[in-house]
Amino acid sequence: MNNQPTKYIWFDGKMVPWEQATVHVTCHALHYGSAVFEGIRAYDTASGPQVFRLKEHIDRLFNSAKIYRFPIPFTKQEVMDACCKVITDNGLPSGYIRPLVFIGPVGLGVRFPAGTKAQVMVCALPWGAYLGEEGLQKGVDVCVSSWHRLHPNTIPTEAKAAGNYLSSILIANECAQNGYTEAIALDTNGYVSEGSGENVFVVKDNVLYTAPYTCGLLPGITRHSIITLAREVLGLEVREQLIPREMVYMADELFFTGTAAEITPIASVDGIEVGPGHRGPITERLQSVFFDVVKGKVEDKWGWLTPVAK
Ligand SMILES: Cc1ncc(COP(=O)(O)O)c(C=O)c1O
């Protein structure tokens, strides 16, 4: 994973040098997790860098802020323009874009004062395959986490909020400690929810299954893209339904989807091989269609790509 600074960060409406994009230690978000964010990819295409599903990511960002009543003092268009600008101004051919909306240093009360406006920053970094290049081809070994995802009406999982990632940190660190690349977390009813930063798909008898929104998961934009491509390009049946734990052991194929993970095959769960124990044919076809679309190699029928330069 990349942590190399780029030159500029868009911070509260202005491009500032990387090292000047700082906040005070009394920042509300630092103490109480009052932040919502997005993770977006820009891909290197023949017509320059293009951002994948920018509008949907910014809609989700504004919805996450709406749930928490964080007033954003910028329009969606301004934040979308900032996402493009951090790619162009930093001279990145491709990259991972991170918009963050947070409550700044407004005092130590949990309830932020009336009239508080959220602060907004957008940065971008070069980023390769999240779960490794080899993982994209061979698949990754995962376990079922001992940590469950959030119960409904505790913390809303449809909001991509910083605090939700405490659950992800528990899941990701535990599985790494036990020698796995990632984990699948169950919801509080014991059904499959999602990975620490990815949605999960099961392939069984040529049908794709994925858990519904009500299983304590973030409704991924990649998840939606894969459902669309599976149905419209590959003509596959896709069912959103409860997935019992044993279904992942009996799957023909299993894969993660996410902006960072893209489409990563799962080779084994809890030491049990999935199908033949490597990437299956449907996962491979979906990867190929997905990468052709995001890299602008085929017609963008769905209007999913936004060029960064106007
Ligand atoms: C917890 C969680 N679930 C699912 C996803 C996949 O969402 P998307 O495809 O929109 O990146 C992510 C990544 O953002 C995530 O962090």
Image (tube, rainbow, N blue to C red):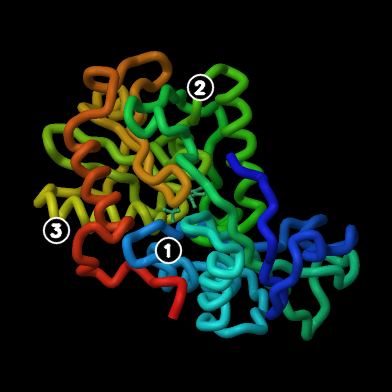
Does the residue tagged 2 have its C-beta within 8 Å of any atom of ligand 1? Answer: no
Q: Amino acid at mark 3?
A: Glu
Mark in the foreground, 1 or 2: 1
Determine which quarter of the picture holds residue 46.
bottom left
Q: Quadrant of the N terminus?
A: top right
Residue, disc 2: 180
User: Do tag 1 and tag 2 residues touch (Cβ < 8 Å)?
Assistant: no
At label 1, counting other C-alpha atoms closer than 10 Å, the crowd grade (few under 14, some 14-19, many 20 or more) is many
Q: Is residue 261 above or below residue 89?
A: above
Tell me what residue is drawn at x 46 percent, y 32 percent: 132
Residue, disc 3: 232
Q: Amino acid at mark 2?
A: Tyr
Q: Where residue 162 sits: x, y (%)? A: 65, 55
Q: Where residue 26 sits: x, y (%)? A: 89, 61
Tell me what residue is drawn at x 78 percent, y 80 percent: 116
* Of callouts 3 and 2, the N-terminal one: 2
Q: Where residue 236 sits: x, y (%)? A: 12, 48
2 vs 212, nearest the viewer: 2
